[in-house]
């Protein structure tokens, strides 16, 4: 059965073009369009689509207000369209915090016929976003149908890329077993923490970093799949909310405890164990799908800090981070993965679990406390 989509945009051209792209693929179909946020809320309640694509700048009711009302009255996965500007980034981060699942850059030029890559990405994102329909904003499965599946099936089919089956069961969480988690003590074995994430990552990273103490004892690196225009705004937002310092990484930045460096979009972040530890920012190789790439940063950290890295893979599409995690493990370092139940998209963590690289599989709500306890802070 095709995934149903409600297309929301004040531009008649954009509504028509997005609808045309969607209807060109038999796996998805447009069930309605809306020219402003108020109509979007009404049609979402009436049509109950699987996914809503939403613009921000609209008359009557803007995209954030419409998104908030949809999340309140008829929770539906929302894919935001965003301009590649600082203001667009700020609004998109607000939308993700309000409940949007993912976003795509809005470009009239790229929406002209014949731009096959954008058409493919739009369809892929809609299909991925649709799989989150029975999940709450923090990743928990909701709704009577999903409750019945949980009660009757001990191992659900993971949410993520293309019918991937779990080949090894993740370690149980305290919520599942009723037993307190035995916290691994990393102490002097950890000189660097590196997060890797994609879809759902901004909210997950925010939830973790905002609860870390100001005296967090080791440096942090963050690789979040994001456009160049967004990473600066994301780092600024985190820095305002966190006790630790957070900023977008620049070439030559020194690593130090209590500082989190976010890889800039469109480039790669590597690490060197000299001058007390520093990052190198290099141009993103066009042959690589991800810029920044978790594999690149994990691999670099494994080389320069063998046995001294904690790599944490959070929610996201695809498998970026798996090969880098393998390098970390081969060097004697530790790898954690987010569990399926708390992921928006169980793709990147699933790849870690399937490859048997995860030393711990944690609910998002456990990551911060487990991390601070493991490091003795």
Image (tube, rainbow, N blue to C red):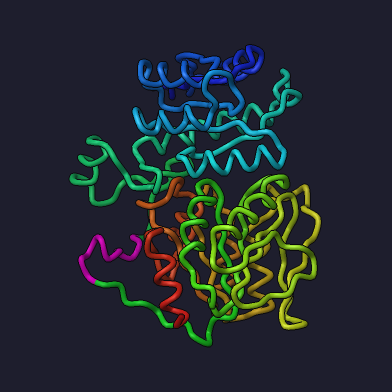
The main secondary structure of the magenta stretch is loop
Q: In this view, does 247 lie to the left or right of 280?
A: left
**Residue 3, horizontal then vertical, whole percent:** 43, 24
**Magenta-colored stretch includes residue 148:** no
Residue at 55% x, 26% y is 62
Give the image quarter of residue 304.
bottom right
**Magenta-colored stretch includes residue 176:** yes
Q: Is residue 128 above or below residue 123?
A: below
Residue at 44% x, 46% y is 344
Q: In this view, does 251 lie to the left or right of 190?
A: right
**Residue 281, horizontal then vertical, whole percent:** 77, 62
Residue at 68% x, 39% y is 87
**Residue 56, horizontal then vertical, whole percent:** 59, 29
Q: Which residue is situated farthest in the bottom direction here? A: 188
Q: Could you say which is closer to the camera, residue 121 or residue 357?
A: 121
Q: Could you say which is closer to the camera, residue 342 or residue 113?
A: 342
**Residue 210, horizontal then vertical, whole percent:** 49, 62
Range of the magenta residues?
Answer: 169-179
């Amino acid at each position: 059965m095709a995934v149903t989509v409600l297309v929301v945009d004040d531009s008649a051209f954009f509504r028509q073009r997005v609808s045309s792209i969607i209807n060109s693929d038999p796996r998805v179909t447009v069930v309605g369009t809306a020219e402003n946020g108020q109509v979007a809320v009404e049609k979402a309640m009436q049509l109950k689509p699987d996914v809503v694509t939403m613009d921000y700048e609209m008359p009557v009711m803007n995209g954030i207000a419409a998104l908030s009302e949809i999340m309140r009255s008829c929770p539906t996965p929302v894919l935001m369209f965003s301009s590649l500007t600082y203001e667009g980034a700020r609004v998109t981060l607000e939308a993700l915090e309000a409940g949007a699942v993912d976003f795509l850059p809005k470009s009239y030029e790229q929406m002209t016929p014949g731009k096959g890559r954008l058409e493919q990405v739009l369809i892929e994102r809609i299909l991925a976003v649709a799989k989150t329909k029975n999940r709450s904003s923090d990743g928990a499965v909701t709704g009577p149908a999903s409750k019945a599946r949980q009660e009757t099936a001990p191992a659900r089919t993971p949410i993520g890329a293309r019918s991937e089956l779990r080949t090894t069961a993740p370690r149980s969480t305290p919520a599942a077993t009723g037993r307190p988690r035995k916290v691994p003590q990393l102490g002097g074995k950890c000189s660097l923490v590196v997060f890797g994430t994609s879809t759902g990552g901004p909210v997950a990273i925010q939830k973790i970093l905002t609860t870390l103490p100001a005296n967090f004892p080791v440096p942090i690196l963050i690789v979040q799949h994001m456009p160049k225009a967004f990473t600066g705004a994301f780092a600024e937002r985190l820095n305002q909310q966190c006790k630790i310092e957070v900023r977008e990484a620049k070439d030559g930045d020194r690593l130090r405890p209590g500082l989190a460096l976010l890889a800039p979009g469109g480039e790669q972040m590597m690490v060197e164990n000299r001058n007390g530890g520093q990052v190198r920012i290099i141009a993103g190789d066009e042959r690589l799908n991800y810029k920044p790439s978790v594999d690149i940063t994990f691999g670099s950290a494994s080389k320069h800090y063998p046995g001294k890295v904690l790599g944490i893979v959070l929610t996201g599409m695809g498998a970026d981070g798996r090969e880098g995690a393998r390098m970390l493990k081969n060097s004697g370092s530790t790898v954690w993965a987010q569990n399926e139940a708390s992921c928006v998209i169980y793709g990147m963590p699933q790849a870690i679990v399937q490859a048997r690289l995860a030393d711990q599989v944690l609910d998002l709500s456990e990551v911060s406390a487990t991390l601070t306890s493991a490091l003795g802070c």
